[in-house]
Every structure is written in C-alpha cells, then in structure tokens.
Amino acid sequence: MWIQNFPNTDEWYGAIPEEARPVKDQPFYHLLAENDQSYYIAYVSEQNLIADISGDPVDHPDIEDIFGPFENGAYPLQFQLN
C-alpha cells in the first residue's frame, strides 16, 4: 500500500460524480486489489477503504514482491515503501 495526498488533476476530480467524489484533504492509497475477473492496483481514498477481516491469505500475484510469507494472519513488509 502506497500513501500520498491527492495528486490528480482538477479535471480528473471533476469527472467523478459529486455524490461519489472523495474529499481531497485525505490520504490516497495504491492497493493490491482483485475481483472475479482480474488482479490490479487500485487507487483509493482513505474514506473508501474497507478492512478485510477474513484473516485469509491474499491471492494477488504481486504480493510476494512486496511482502514476506503469510504468517499468523499477516504479511510482513519486505522493505520500507516511503
């Protein structure tokens, strides 16, 4: 997960429907994500994060590049990202 403040353009921000538009003054994260069809990296505002409390391992193909082996319900970070 990479954290940064809102770095996109006002044009990008304005293209988001007002009712779904995130607040700019919050952290934004790049996440390893997946759905039924694919794996991808998502860009998500903090207000839209939902905790995965399943305790199950993640099946994303990039997980091994960033984290160590799944142990005791968590992945240890292999290196500091920021």
Image: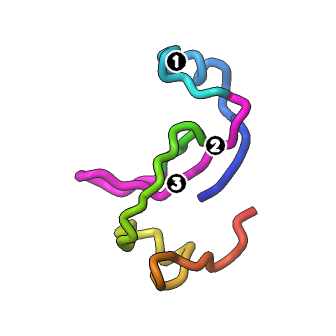
Q: Residue 38: x percent and y percent? A: 30, 54
Depth check: 39 or 17 in front? 17
Q: Residue 21: x percent and y percent? A: 54, 23
Residue at 62% across, 79% down:
78
Task: Rate crowding at label 1 as few (under 14), some (14 to 19) or many (20 or more) other CA atoms within 10 Å.
Answer: few
C-alpha distance separating marks 2 and 1: 17 Å
Where disc 2 sits, the SS reads strand
Which of the two marks, 1 or 3, is nearer to us in this view? 3
Residue at 60% across, 48% down:
29
Q: Residue 40: x percent and y percent? A: 41, 53
Check if mark 1's residue and mark 3's residue have beta carbons within 8 Å.
no
Task: Rate crowding at label 2 as few (under 14), some (14 to 19) or many (20 or more) other CA atoms within 10 Å.
Answer: many
Where disc 1 sits, the SS reads helix
Where disc 3 sits, the SS reads strand
- 81 within the magenta span: no
In the picture, the disc for residue 31 is 3
In the picture, the disc for residue 28 is 2
Which residue position is annotated with label 1? 15
Q: Amino acid at mark 1?
A: Ala
Residue span colored magenta:
24-41
